[in-house]
Structures are given as structure tokens and as C-alpha cells.
Image (cartoon, grey):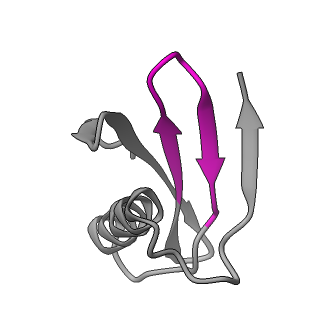
Amino acid sequence: MDSTPIEYRGCELSVIVRHLAGQFVATLLVERPGGVRRAIGPFRAFPTALAAASYAIECGKAELDGRLAARGPQVAVSG
């Protein structure tokens, strides 16, 4: 399941959710102005795709707001 991208603080947030071993795991894609993209995650497993996607979006918003915990998720950068 791929989410419809949302715009937040000038960035585009979108989520890719995968079904693994009976649970759903999300990876967040953040595209900043200028085309720099980052993948954050995968995050912990959830019982539904919607819960996984919602959590990933909230983590993305927290990162853009500067509220992401010190021990953040794995990050991949491309650009």
C-alpha cells in the first residue's frame, strides 16, 4: 500500500507500507524543496496498514518540527 503524498512544512511526505508476517511495516519518504529525498524507517510493525502509515506520517512531522527522538529510525539519503 502506498499513501497519497501530503505536504507539510514545504516538504512532501509519503508512505510505503509492506505486509510482512501478518503485520504491516511502513517506510516514510520525505522530499524536501530542491528534490532531496530521504527514506526513514522501516518503523515498528502494526496490526493494520492504516496504523502503520499514520505512525510514519506523524514521525515525519515530528522530524520536520525538530521533535524526533535522539534514537531515531534508520535513514537513507538520495539526491
Residue 21 appears left or right of 76:
left
- Occupied quadrant, residue 20: bottom right
Q: Nearer the viewer, residue 48 or 6?
A: 6
Instruction: Name the spot of residue 36 as percent of width and height, x first.
Output: 60, 25
Q: Nearer the viewer, residue 13 or 42?
A: 13
- Occupied quadrant, residue 72: bottom right
Residue 43 appears left or right of 60:
right
Point out the image quarter for the C terminus. top right
Instruction: Name the spot of residue 2 as percent of width and height, x first.
Output: 38, 41
Q: Which residue shows up at 33% across the image and 68% down it? A: 58
What is the span of residues highlighted in magenta in the rendered image?
Answer: 27-42
Q: Up-down: is 42 above or below 13?
A: below
Instruction: Name the spot of residue 75 as percent of width and height, x first.
Output: 72, 55
Decide whether residue 39 is among the magenta residues: yes
Q: Nearer the viewer, residue 13 or 34?
A: 34
Kindly give the residue lying farthest to the top in the view shown: 34
Q: Which residue shows up at 57% across the image and 83% down it? A: 69
Q: Up-down: is 1 above or below 47?
A: above
- Occupied quadrant, residue 37: top right
Decide whether residue 36 is among the magenta residues: yes
Q: Which residue shows up at 66% across the image and 83% down it? A: 70
Q: Which residue shows up at 37% across the image and 42% down it? A: 13
Q: How many marks?
A: 0
